[in-house]
Amino acid sequence: MSKSTHDRLVALRRDLHRHPEPAWREFYTTARIVEEVERIGVDELHVGPDALNTDERMAVPDDDVLDDWYDRALDAGADPDVLEDLRGGFTGAVAVLRTGEGPTVGLRVDIDGLPQAESDDDDHVPAREGFRSENEGAMHACGHDAHATFGIGVLERVKESDFEGTFKVFFQPAEERVGGGRAMARSGHLDDVDYLLAVHVGLDHPTGEVVAGIDGFLAVSHFLAEYEGEPAHAGAKPEAGRNTVQAMAAAIQNLYGIPRHSEGETRVNAGLVGGGTATNVIPEESFVEGEVRGETTELKDYMKDHAHRVLRSAAEMHDVDVDIHTEGEAPSAASDRALADIVYDVASATDGVDSPVESDKLGGSEDATFLMQEVQDNGGLACYLAVGTDHPGGHHTATFDVDEASIPIGIDVLADSILSIAENEP
Amino acid sequence: MSKSTHDRLVALRRDLHRHPEPAWREFYTTARIVEEVERIGVDELHVGPDALNTDERMAVPDDDVLDDWYDRALDAGADPDVLEDLRGGFTGAVAVLRTGEGPTVGLRVDIDGLPQAESDDDDHVPAREGFRSENEGAMHACGHDAHATFGIGVLERVKESDFEGTFKVFFQPAEERVGGGRAMARSGHLDDVDYLLAVHVGLDHPTGEVVAGIDGFLAVSHFLAEYEGEPAHAGAKPEAGRNTVQAMAAAIQNLYGIPRHSEGETRVNAGLVGGGTATNVIPEESFVEGEVRGETTELKDYMKDHAHRVLRSAAEMHDVDVDIHTEGEAPSAASDRALADIVYDVASATDGVDSPVESDKLGGSEDATFLMQEVQDNGGLACYLAVGTDHPGGHHTATFDVDEASIPIGIDVLADSILSIAENEP
Amino acid sequence: MSKSTHDRLVALRRDLHRHPEPAWREFYTTARIVEEVERIGVDELHVGPDALNTDERMAVPDDDVLDDWYDRALDAGADPDVLEDLRGGFTGAVAVLRTGEGPTVGLRVDIDGLPQAESDDDDHVPAREGFRSENEGAMHACGHDAHATFGIGVLERVKESDFEGTFKVFFQPAEERVGGGRAMARSGHLDDVDYLLAVHVGLDHPTGEVVAGIDGFLAVSHFLAEYEGEPAHAGAKPEAGRNTVQAMAAAIQNLYGIPRHSEGETRVNAGLVGGGTATNVIPEESFVEGEVRGETTELKDYMKDHAHRVLRSAAEMHDVDVDIHTEGEAPSAASDRALADIVYDVASATDGVDSPVESDKLGGSEDATFLMQEVQDNGGLACYLAVGTDHPGGHHTATFDVDEASIPIGIDVLADSILSIAENEP
Amino acid sequence: MSKSTHDRLVALRRDLHRHPEPAWREFYTTARIVEEVERIGVDELHVGPDALNTDERMAVPDDDVLDDWYDRALDAGADPDVLEDLRGGFTGAVAVLRTGEGPTVGLRVDIDGLPQAESDDDDHVPAREGFRSENEGAMHACGHDAHATFGIGVLERVKESDFEGTFKVFFQPAEERVGGGRAMARSGHLDDVDYLLAVHVGLDHPTGEVVAGIDGFLAVSHFLAEYEGEPAHAGAKPEAGRNTVQAMAAAIQNLYGIPRHSEGETRVNAGLVGGGTATNVIPEESFVEGEVRGETTELKDYMKDHAHRVLRSAAEMHDVDVDIHTEGEAPSAASDRALADIVYDVASATDGVDSPVESDKLGGSEDATFLMQEVQDNGGLACYLAVGTDHPGGHHTATFDVDEASIPIGIDVLADSILSIAENEP
């Protein structure tokens, strides 16, 4: 990679880092990606609603939240024409190169930030070097700024190569809420994809390591249960209330008691809960926000069925109402070994990669699995790889950062893998 | 009371004490009562099914249990002809005297024993003097042997007196399970009763005390919830079970959490619970036997509604089935002051009563309330009185006993009150 | 009461209404009271820390909250010299008149507002007539603006009368959090009080009613339990967390299950609870804010002991830490009939009172009970009375308001009762 | 195997089947084994306490239960001299052959029956052919009668062979309660064992299948928590009780909520629970009998620590006492492949074996793991194999039975494997 290309990509990554935007609020980010894609030049560019199945979005924030972030993006200098297309939280883009006969290869990168305040300590490079988040309370604490940069860098490399076939880059929004994968997977743009790569930086692998095939995605489903009862004075009329905090407590106790499953790992967590208004009022409202997971999609569904039953029965038990929403969801998936082998071979031959790794387990969830599954269901192959990066703080913490030396490594491994895939059609 | 009458009544009481029979199993007891009533001679005698509304019995044991006790009664020498009428657990009797114009006055006494083993300690009079229970595991530990004796003694006294009117003695079965009161209250025999007395010995009042009017009956409802799920090997297939012990635990936790009520006292207790078979089997069956109470019948119903909802929702929560039975029930009631005043005056003038008391609170439950309420609903008056007796052990314990000196006192107070009531028609 | 006095007092009440200040933040209010008391002229005036036992305050907010309200009071024009004395949340005052030989009579009024937004509907008189709260989110929704006005009005009336003895007005802060009563009760200023009156407007009694003696105060104790555990990724390392939401749920379930008590009413409520940060993080922190009550102080203590045990054991059960704070507390108390009789007689003879009532039950809690108990423990008498007022909305709601016609009625009844008490020394 | 040997072994198995004896009650069984071993003739025979580390027994029944079974064994004709050694529940035996230089090879077989009533249906072979259990309520429902027979048959075969080395047969008691493995493992008799085989019939494998190496033993720990509180009348004095059923319910709810573990499978079950005496009594006693398991011994310990904490805190929460006993325990273990390969080769060449299987998972628990671990910790090898048998009913059911055709197969595979091991010393 030339010095100038390198500098341009690092500058892009830092610009995105300065403007982290959580799920469905990637207005600035999408506009900036569009700008870069248009600079490169592609055969098709699908932006916002055209990149999604708009009925399939999950975990979309309220309109006023969306509007607020829209205005911030405008203030930060995003292109108003692009923004107009994104209004209402329709973010993300799909860029397409068509260059002769050959297979259709896809690359999926996610682009959203997190609701996490960023460190302002001098030890934290973005703080010291002036590209710390300008959106207080939000941060690229999981490296999706690097992922978006990978997408641009690889697009550029493939465009300049002798690639034969169709190449698509999926700039996916709302991964952190597992809210965007399904909408992009069902957009139609995956229908003709024969091979799909997806990528993540870090994951506790240092710069110089590349993991060719990640497995062990836990399928996941987020839920929000909102209880509504009746308030009453706790001293004068305790019997007149319908107590949502009692319902919430019964639900929590029994959620964690969903039976373990002999066919694989399951998880449940009531991660954010609350209720009531004052000590002397029988609590009228409460909520439980949580998640279930499973080693397979079936195990996730087993947990989800049980969890929803518990949440519902707890309401019935205390004579209160409950609304249960599924806030985000992702299936399980597995990397195809045939693709992973190509990635492994490419990585082994790539400058800067000193420790290629055949495979590893994620142990968490990711909605890239929706896109992987879509391709696999159509008879294609999919592979999720990790590009190591020295990250001082853990993922999702205030001091997370990407070692920029890993950016060209990631682009090289991805671009060369794509060329090899198109040539070998495994 | 003549020495011979006294001796005969004490002998009767001891005979009943030797043959304690729990709820709906009072075969020997009823036969013995019938024998005494026939000796005295009455105008009507309604036995077993004729003394009850047979559809209204509650807490009736299984047939094999009934049959077992039936056979015991036969073995103990009870009259087979009388027993034949009682077959199937239709116990109890109503004796009627009709002697000229006047009001109808009733006396209700209960006759059942308890499933409580009796002390065989020499300090325990029945053990020492040879009239300890011959039905191992059963005992007259609440003095209903004395109550039945009161009924016979008073019947005799009223028969011999110049009483004018109708006098009925209700020998009620199954009070300890609050299972018999309703069936007798709705038998029709209460319909013409203008005044009703009911009586209890002891209640922590010593010999020589008589409490003219007892109040503070808590309305009560017993429940039995039986859960049924699916067993599974807890190690190999935990997900294949439907766990009734988890349901039971959720039910118990939330039963005790039914909100307190500002209009009066409420109670709840899961008094007998169990479930499962072995450590390595997901428990297929469990049960919760318990009760709710209220200072009023309405408060009891409030508790019952909530308890049943909790019991049901706990089943739903763990995907198991539940059957909920109401096993016994009694309303609240209050003694009419006008009757209590007569009892108080009579007691004050009775030999052996040194401490007449105007009123006291029961703090427990009693299904005499069904009969009291029936009379009161028809415009009559009812009063529940206590005849003190020195009892060495507490009610429902292995060393409970009645001081036989209180038997003639009780008969005198009751008989004279009945005569005074008939004369004064308050 | 003269027109000018009336107008002045109504203006005072409206000024206080415009500046509602919650517990321990009554900076403007205290300064305004001091101003009025100094206008009237008294023999002693104890302000802020001098009016309190400063070690006995409960439910004091954090310093930054106090500072914020301090600055508001300054901005609203409160006397900076008075404010200086109150810094740190030492609010309230005690005014003393000494006029010859005679008993010491006290009047306790509370002065704090509530964290409740006030209606801006035109039907709401303070909104329509321009004295709606200027402290957004805070409101005099329980009439303590009228209580403070009673204090000033009565002080003025007693000063002008032929009262012989000592008269003290206790302007008590932080009643709504039951946080100020104890600190004022133990200030020393109650030690010589022979007779104490306390007063409340409204309580669902209309203008024209006066209740001479209020009873049925439930003793109360507020608690705040803060749980601290360990976060962990709920998918990748569920075993690494120490889960405070599980602890919280176990605590709530078992708090409501504290056994009922046969000696009187008890209450428990987990009124405000919360925990956790995100669906995929094992919750590191949670809290339960709640209260227990009892018909007597002993019953409250029974509930408090049980509640604290449950809160502690729930932490132990899930291997997390817990801090339990008692946030506010008040004993039970009873109005002395001898004082209530005087109030009743006075009320019966007062213009504007058309329905004097002998007694009523509060059914809630009040920390005037600390002051009443202090006086009673010293051999004095205490009485809590209610001055009816037509209030369109309920207490503690956005549309609560005081009918200003009840202000002179309250002042007349209180002042005349005080004169009668001093004269009759019941 | 000769017809006469075959008939003798089948007769032995049927005799043991007629006298099933649960954990630590194998009096008849041990005496019968001793008789057979003495008939064969061995170099050492350690019986009862000499075969065990007597301090390490778990899940030993009460003395009166032991005495009762002792008397039954005597009545059934067991040798009184042998019985004398076993008094107090010290059952089991270790038989030792020493025949020249060579390694020490062990065979562990378990010998206890189950508390399970046996079918008396004519379809059930033991019923039809007259060797159904004579101990009503007890049954060899898991094939340990065949295991003991394997032990005798193999001992005889090895004695008659040209085996060089030391051969030990461990007749282990109390496997079903995972109570005997530890005591035998730590008896000292394992210290010099270089190779250990353990065996089970059936496990859903038909006659003709042999599984050479079983893995997937879940480590297990049984617990019995006994709660003791205070009874009280649930209506009159609810506050006077200390309620063990509330404690039990809190324990159950939170046991099932022990967090899942990312390092492997865990299990928990409250398999047998109960409490209380009557609906109107606050329950004084309750118990929870259950188990935890883990894919590794560490995971079992993780579960055990959490379970005991929950059981204890639940007592503290409701102010009751609790005793927690570990009733039985077994670690995890794995079959050594080197031994399993020998077994596989031997089985493949054995008459009657048509489907040799390399390995399978148990999915349950077994305390042979104590002996396996002891050998492995000393540098030896261990292997657990399954000898298929057509069993009409499932393990632990009333119609379980062993196809006697599998008895000579098992003996051949075991004996030939032992010879091959001694020869090859893998």
Image: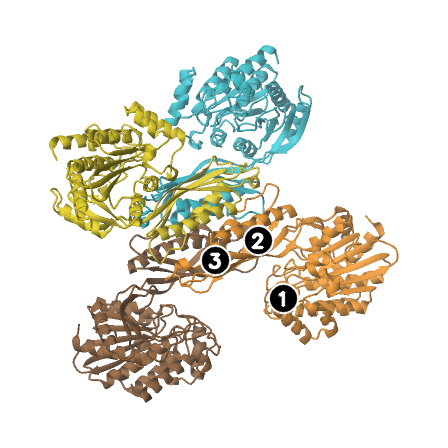
Chain colours: A orange, B yellow, C brown, D cyan
Q: Which residue is mark 2?
A: C234
Does the rendering let one see residue A26?
Answer: yes
Quarter placement of the C terminus of chain C: bottom left
**Number of residues whose C-alpha sits closer than 10 Å to that of mark 2, classed few (under 14), some (14–19) or many (20 or more):** many
C-alpha distance separating marks 2 and 1 = 21 Å
Q: Residue at x 61, y 50 (%)?
A: A293
Task: Residue type at mark 2: give it.
Answer: Ala
Q: Secondary structure at mark 2?
A: loop
Task: Residue type at mark 1: give it.
Answer: Met
Which is in the foreground here, disc 3 or disc 1? 3
Q: Secondary structure at mark 3?
A: helix
Q: Quick check: D423 above or below A88?
A: above
Q: Which residue is mark 3?
A: A244
Location of residue A272 by image quarter: bottom right
Q: Secondary structure at mark 1?
A: loop
Q: Residue furthest bottom?
A: C4
